[in-house]
Amino acid sequence: MIQQEIAALLPRLRRFARTVTYHREDADDLVQIAVERALGRSEQWEPGTRLDSWLFRIMKNAWIDEVRSRMRRDAVFAPEEAGEHVGDDYAEAHQQRIAIQQAVSRLSDEHRMVVALVLVDGLPYKEAAEVLEIPIGTLTSRLVRARTALQELLSDQARNV
């Protein structure tokens, strides 16, 4: 049953959404929109094809729609959870995670989606290219540029500390 298969994919969908949107609330909204669209259009899914890729594509398109429909402020604020572990033993690891999240958030949407699908969720290049509806060569070049940009952003942050 498609509902059960979608439910089993929720952790992966949420992880992808968190990487793409960078905000917990936006991620939750994006997952909800994608699941609603998938359930409402379940007859469009072709059995025998990958349900996760179909859902990732729905999420990608929903996020593009969302970005186009709202005006985002230029300022990026640290998420509420950024201050949760100040002073405990995990502070350094937490700071590293925040630095990585901030670096990923500064990537373009195209690069963030590639990073989310390939590096975070572990999709093979071919399937990630299908989800994003781009040639595999474009995916690999975006991934190289995204990795380079992340390295530069993280080195800049380390120098500024």
Image (cartoon, helix red, strand yellow):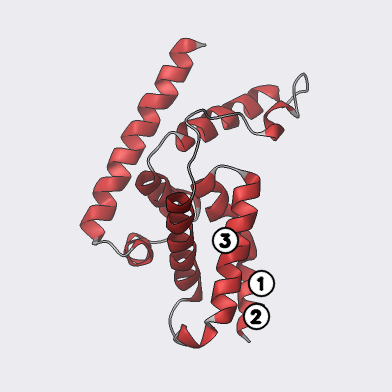
User: Left of 62 or right of it: where is 1?
Assistant: right
Q: Is residue 31 above or below residue 71?
A: below
Q: Is residue 101 above or below residue 70?
A: above
Locate the N terminus by quadrant. Answer: bottom right
Q: Residues within 10 Å of mark 1 (few under 14, many from 20)?
A: few
At label 2, the amino acid type is Gln
Residue of label 3: 13
- The label shown at residue 48 is none
Which SS class for mark 3?
A: helix
Residue of label 2: 3
Asked whether the beta carbons under mark 1 and mark 2 sit within 8 Å of each other, the answer is yes
Which SS class for mark 2?
A: helix
Residue 98 appears in which quarter of the rendering?
top right
User: Left of 5 or right of it: where is 160?
Assistant: left
CA gap, disc 3 and disc 1: 10 Å
Which SS class for mark 1?
A: helix
Residue of label 1: 7
> Which of the two labelled residues, at mark 3 and mark 1, occupies the earlier sequence position?
1
Question: What residue is at 50 percent from the left and 34 percent from the top?
Answer: 73
Q: Residues within 10 Å of mark 3 (few under 14, many from 20)?
A: many
Asked whether the beta carbons under mark 3 and mark 2 sit within 8 Å of each other, the answer is no
Q: Nearer the viewer, residue 35 or 69?
A: 69
